[in-house]
Image: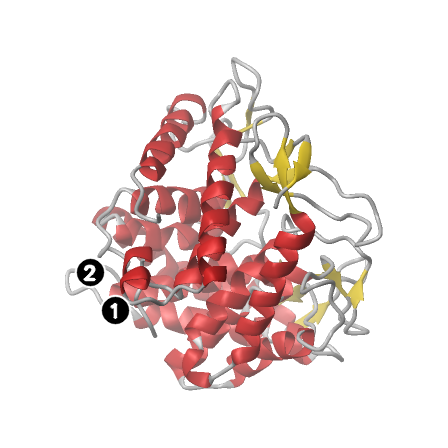
Amino acid sequence: MGYDELMPLSRIGVDGLGGLGATVVDALDTAMIMKLDDVVFEAGSWIEKHLPERISHKGQVNLFETTIRVVGGLLSAYHLSNSNPTYKGPTPSVYLENAKNLADRLLTAFTLSLTAIPFSDVVLRDHTAHAAPDGLSSTSEASTLQLKFNYLSFLTGEPKYSLEAMKVLEHMKNLPKVEGLVPIYISPSSGEFSGGNIRLGSHGDSYYEYLIKVWLQQRQSNWTYLHDMYVEAMKGVKHLLVKKSKPNGLVFVGELPSGIDGAQWEIVANKVCFLPGTLALGATKGVTKAKAMEENLLTFEDLENLKLAEDLAKTCFEMYAVTSTGLAPEIAYFNSEGYSEEEDSKYREWGWSIFEAFEKYTKVDSGGYSSLDDVTVLPPRRRDKMETFFLGETLKYLYLLFSDSDVIPLTVRL
């Protein structure tokens, strides 16, 4: 309790993310969704008592990690506690006040940069910010902040958070791209993309995922360029990156580590498994497939993207199913050839198989879940580390997969 991450084998906590209690904050909304009232009360009480002082006195943190895990966790906790009449814990304003205090310090990453691209790191106690040692920022990290900062501006009535964050996407829309695809690094000093590495895995993933999410969040602002950027990018993905494996015909998304003129790698990062959901969201604009079809909202391209989403989801499951442990590796390699319904019960069957594998091979009797060195080896060799997002994302998504659709409806809007 109170450390950033759990080392489940050693049974100790470590502060690898700046010391803001990232696991407590990141997991809180999952506990709220699951109605784990005792956990919610304990976590909320810790935040009320300890987090303000840590925000004021801690040192260097990563802008991206702190925003998605801590600011995002606090805003989700505020939303869920404020709308739940049976909530028991500190007043919901505690979460909003901490999110605002932290975001005020994170804003220095934007305001101290000479371009629209924020620095990667912030020193909380000094209100200073600086670039990473290589001078670059991650493209996905710089373009993942908008959803949280927009929502914070909505809640507080202070536009500064949204204005600074949206400058990033406004700037990126005018930069050169390869059929809508972008390199995975960008320079806060020049404002230009750096290198030619194009991929939808680490450092690239969230750029594509958040274009459509921010557009859906901000549709009343008529920021149509976000949707246009998303549509162009998905066309580029289908044209340049989508392949089929040999001999099993699994559809996957490859990488261009040297850009459009270099060799393509037939490699799939587990992180690319965000794409099926993104494609489905972009096709249906946030409603169910059944409703979109009933109201004749789907274009031919939307239907094509839904089919691709289903094919990619199958590949993502197969990355789990083919290993000895039933758990997917971070990276998989494919042999390839060219590649020319959302409420399906099979997704719950796949999800249950994955959950059972986590329970069988990663659960630690004394508490927590471990990472594995190699998912193809039995008995598994456990790593002494549990990521905060295992609670904040993996278990949340598995829980929602088996929940009624009204627990967190797709149609929720600001």
State the image coordinates of residue 374 (x, y, percent, origin top left).
60, 23
Identify the amino acid type marked 1.
Asn
Disc number for residue 74: none
Residue 87: numbered disc? 2
- Label 2 crowding class (10 Å Cα cut-off): few <14, some 14-19, many 20+? some
- In this orientation, which residue lies closer to the viewer: 413 or 189? 413
Label 1, label 2: how far apart the Cα atoms are: 8 Å
Q: Position of residue 290 (x, y in %)?
A: 28, 56
Residue 337 appears in view: yes
Can you name the residue that lies furthest to the left here?
Answer: 86
How is the protein colored in the picture? secondary structure
Q: Residue at x 43, y 71 (%)?
A: 216
Assess disc 1: are there few (<14), some (14-19) or many (≥20) residues with their C-alpha within 10 Å of its C-alpha.
some
Q: Is disc 2 placed on a helix, strand or loop?
A: loop
Query: Which residue of the protein is positioned furthest toward the right in this rendering?
Result: 261
Residues marked 1 and 2 touching at CB (< 8 Å): yes
From the viewer's perspective, tell me whether residue 156 is left or right of residue 238: left
